[in-house]
Image: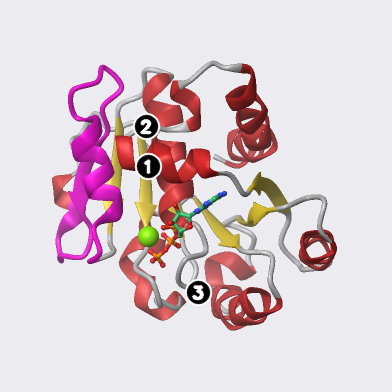
Amino acid sequence: MRTILVASSKGGAGKSTVVTNLAAHFALEGKRTVLVDADRQESSSHWCAKRAGLDSAVLPVDGSRRGWEKQLPSDTQYVVIDAAAGAMADDLDAHLALADAVLVPVNPSMIDLEATVPFLDSLAALPRVKKGKLPVALVANRLKPWTGASQQAVAQLQSWPYPLVGQLRDTQAYVLMVALGKSVFDYHSEQIRGHQADWAPLLKWLKKVL
Ligand SMILES: Nc1ncnc2c1ncn2[C@@H]1O[C@H](COP(=O)(O)OP(=O)(O)OP(=O)(O)O)[C@@H](O)[C@H]1O
Ligand SMILES: [Mg+2]
C-alpha cells in the first residue's frame, strides 16, 4: 500500500483538487484506490460519491474520525489523504504516520507563499522528514504562467528546500470536473491532454519516491 498525504495549513490551496485528480489517476490505472477525507467540509467524499458508478470508482473513508485506518480494505493499493484545512504537522500525526510522501499545494500569491512557510517549518521539524525518510514536495497550483505573479511565485518556490514537482495551471476544467466526480485523467480532448501534461513531473516524482 502506498500513501500520499496532501496537506497545507492554507485554505483553498488546492488540496482537494490534487487529491481527487491523483485518486482518479490511480483508479484509472486499475489500482484499488482509497481517498481518506480528513476535512469536515467533505468535498472529496462528495466527489467519490459522484464517481461511485464508474469502473474507476474511488472508495471514500472518513479520515476525521479516530480509527479510520481500520476501514482501509486489506487489498488497498493506493491511499490519498485530503488533510483538513488549517491543520499543522502536529494535527496530522495519524495521517503522517501512514504517509509515504507528502504533497503541499501552494497558490501563486505572496499571501499564500508566506502562509505556507510555517506549515513547511512544522513538517521540517518531524524526525522522519529530518532523516529524509518522508519525502515532501511542493505543487504550485492555479498558475497563470504568462503573469509576473506566477513567474515570481514559481521562482520563489524553486528556491525553497523542497522540490517543486508540479505546476498546475489555473483552469475552469478543475472546477467543472470536481463537480462531476471527474478528473483531468478521465478525458482525452487535446485541451485536456495539455492539462494532463502538467501532472507528468508530479507523477514521475511519486513513482520515484513511493
Ligand atoms: N488549478 C486550478 N484552476 C482553477 N481552479 C482551481 C484550481 N485548483 C483549485 N481550484 C479551485 O479553487 C478552489 C479551492 O481549491 P480546493 O478546494 O482544491 O482547495 P483546498 O485546499 O482543498 O481548500 P480547503 O482548504 O477549503 O479544503 C476550488 O473552488 C477549486 O475548484
Ligand atoms: Mg479541500
Asked if residue 147 lies left or right of residue 114, the reply is: right
**In this orientation, does residue 2 appear?**
no
- Tell me which amino acid carries mark 2: Lys
Mark 3, mark 1: which one is toward the viewer? 1
Where does the magenta region start and end?
40-69
Dot 3 falls on a residue whose secondary structure is loop
User: Which residue, given by chain and number where applicable, does mark 1 sit on?
Assistant: 178
- Tell me which amino acid carries mark 1: Val
User: Which residue, given by chain and number where applicable, does mark 2 sit on?
Assistant: 182
Distance, label 3 to label 1, CA atoms, is 20 Å
Picture coordinates of residue 142, whole percent (x, y): 62, 54
- Of the pair 90 and 60, the residue shown nearer to us: 60
Identify which residue is drawn at 18% across, 38% down.
49
Quarter of the rendering containing residue 52: top left
Identify which residue is drawn at 45% across, 71% down.
11
Question: Is ligand 1 less than 8 Å from the beta carbon at label 3?
Answer: yes
Marking on residue 10: 3
Question: Is ligand 1 less than 8 Å from the beta carbon at label 1?
Answer: yes
Distance, label 2 to label 1, CA atoms, is 6 Å
In the image, residue 14 sits, relative to residue 109, either above or below, namely: above
Q: Are marks 2 and 3 in contact (CB under 8 Å)?
A: no
Q: Is residue 46 magenta?
A: yes
Asked if residue 22 lies left or right of residue 159, the reply is: left
Q: Is residue 123 magenta?
A: no
